[in-house]
Image: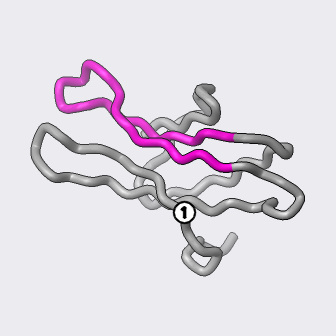
Amino acid sequence: MEIYLNGIRLGCLKYDDFIRIPVPYGHYNVMLKFLNYKMSKYKGIGQEFDITPDNRIVYLKAARVIPGYRTNTTILEPAAEEEMPTV
C-alpha cells in the first residue's frame, strides 16, 4: 500500500508494517491507497487530524475491508497508544 500525507506520496508500507512520521503543528490528511482489482486506479479512505501543542501525537491503524471481490478498500482509524507496536 502507498502512504500519502496531504497528497504527497511518502512511500510504500507492507502488511504488519508501521511507520512514524514527525510533522510540525498543523492540519493533516493521511491516506493509504492500493490498486483496485483492475489495477487501474487507487482506492483508499483517509483520516484527517490536527497536530497541536495539546494533541502532539496521533495514532492511526489501517484495516482492509473486503466486503466483496471487487470492492476492497483500505481504511484508517484512530488507535490508542497501547495498540501500537513498541519501537
Residue 13: x %, y % from top left: 50, 45
Above or below, 36 against 47 in this view is: above
Q: Is residue 72 left or right of residue 58?
A: left
* Residues shaded magenta: 28-49
Quarter holding the N terminus?
top left
Q: Is residue 26 left or right of residue 34?
A: right
- Residue plotted at (62% across, 26% down): 8
Q: Image quarter for residue 59?
A: bottom right
Q: Is residue 39 left or right of residue 27?
A: left
For label 1, the residue is: 78
Element type where label 1 sits in the image: strand
* Relative depth, front residue between 55 and 82: 55
**Three-letter code for the amino acid on which mark 1 is drawn:** Pro
- Residue plotted at (78% across, 51% down): 51
* Residue at the extreme right: 53
Residue 22: x %, y % from top left: 78, 48
